[in-house]
Image: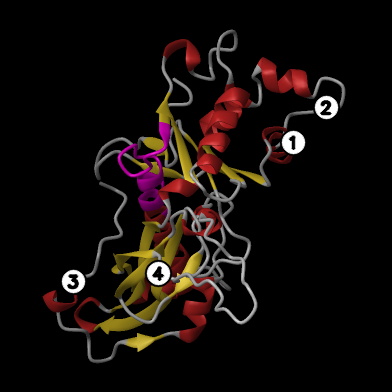
């Protein structure tokens, strides 16, 4: 497949003796932004000190109602801070781009071919991470609160479907499970393009809309702080075949809770645990007269609370 950002098996090869961590290129990789990617806003990054460790799985402990009254000279009631835990394992992902000395010499004046190599590798790594996150959040086996739409219930059926009611059901389900009110609705690009033309949506804005329905307008109508549209695409065809692209987030919608101040002690639908932030390393391959630029990171994308998310699978046909 064209989409390649594989785990690096450290014991498969010896590192080059002249391997160099390039601070400037690492900064460029960390600062690389592309509006197509929403993974960091859906699954906040949490720095961790170990490649593998435990995280809290939040339940309904905060909703217990013990006797908290106290009579004079008696002890206060107590409870334990003992949420369930599960484990994460950070995998190392990386991609290398060789830059031939002849390519560098023939580059246009002012062009930095190594920066271009960093941006290319970073873009692919971010696409892979986006897809890893989308794959778990659009899986009915991973997001156990879910519904799968079909036929006339799908939002492209402008006569029979009820998207606002579907989102209301998702919100009620999350809240009834003891999670905070969901504040983020994620949907694939095709879903958003279909939904913004739905009669139920247009009816809500018929007196106030002067142009197309925006993400902010949709968020206000559906009772969330933000609507995030997944515009990222990935190549589905193999190398050597005609290019074929698909949207990473597919034809799905996910309602979830993402905290404004993420931490390992704060409930959330999903976190990305980061052991090694993106770093750029370079080394020489003298036999090929090239400099190899490597971009790598160590992360784990984890659903930390199934109560905090609800999947609407196949929202459109």
Q: What residue do we see at 22% from left, 86% from top?
A: 16
Q: In the picture, which quadrant includes the C terminus?
A: top left
- Is label 3 or label 2 in front? 2
Query: Which stretch is magenta?
Result: 130-146
Which residue extends farthest front?
A: 72
Which mark is first along the chain, 2 or 1?
2
Q: CA distance from mark 4 to mark 1?
A: 41 Å
Callout 1 touching callout 2 (CB < 8 Å): yes
Could you say which disc has been placed on residue 217 in the image? 1
Query: Which secondary structure lies at badge 3?
Result: loop
In three-dimensional space, the C-alpha distance between marks 3 and 1, rounded to whole angstroms, equals 46 Å
The percent coordinates of residue 192 (x first, y second) are 58, 31
- Tell me the distance, in whole angstroms, between the alpha carbons under discs 3 and 2: 54 Å
Q: Residues within 10 Å of mark 3 (few under 14, many from 20)?
A: few
Q: Marks 4 and 1: which is nearer the front?
A: 4
Residue matched to label 2 = 209
Q: Earlier in the sequence, mark 3 or mark 4?
A: 3
**Residue identifier under label 3:** 9
Labelled pair 4, 2 in contact (Cβ < 8 Å): no
């Amino acid at each position: 497949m064209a989409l390649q950002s594989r785990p690096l098996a450290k014991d498969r090869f010896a590192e080059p003796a002249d391997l160099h961590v390039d601070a400037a290129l690492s900064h460029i990789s960390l600062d690389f932004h592309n509006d197509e990617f929403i993974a960091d806003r859906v699954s906040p990054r949490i720095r961790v000190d170990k490649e593998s460790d435990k995280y809290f799985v939040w339940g309904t402990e905060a909703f217990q109602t013990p006797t908290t009254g106290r009579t004079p000279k008696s002890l206060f009631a107590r409870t334990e801070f003992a949420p369930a835990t599960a484990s994460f394992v950070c995998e190392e992902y990386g991609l290398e781009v060789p830059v031939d000395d002849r390519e560098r010499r023939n580059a246009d004046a002012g062009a930095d071919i190594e920066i271009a190599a960093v941006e290319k590798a970073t873009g692919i790594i971010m696409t892979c991470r986006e897809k890893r996150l989308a794959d778990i959040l659009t899986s009915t086996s991973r997001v156990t609160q879910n519904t799968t739409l079909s036929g006339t219930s799908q939002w492209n059926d402008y006569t029979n479907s009820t998207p606002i009611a579907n989102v209301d059901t998702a919100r009620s389900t999350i809240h009834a499970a003891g999670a905070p009110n969901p504040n983020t609705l994620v949907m694939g690009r095709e879903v958003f393009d279909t939904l913004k033309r739905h009669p139920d949506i247009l009816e809500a804005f018929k007196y106030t809309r002067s142009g197309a329905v925006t993400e902010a307008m949709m968020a206000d109508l559906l009772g969330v702080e933000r609507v995030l549209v997944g515009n990222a695409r990935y190549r589905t065809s193999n190398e050597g075949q005609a290019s074929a692209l698909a949207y990473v987030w597919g034809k799905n919608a996910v309602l979830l809770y993402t905290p404004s101040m993420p931490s390992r002690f704060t409930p959330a639908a999903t976190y990305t645990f980061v052991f090694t932030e993106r770093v750029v390393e370079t080394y020489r391959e003298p036999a090929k007269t090239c400099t190899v630029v490597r971009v790598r990171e160590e992360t784990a994308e984890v659903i930390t609370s199934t109560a905090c998310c609800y999947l609407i699978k196949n929202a459109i046909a």
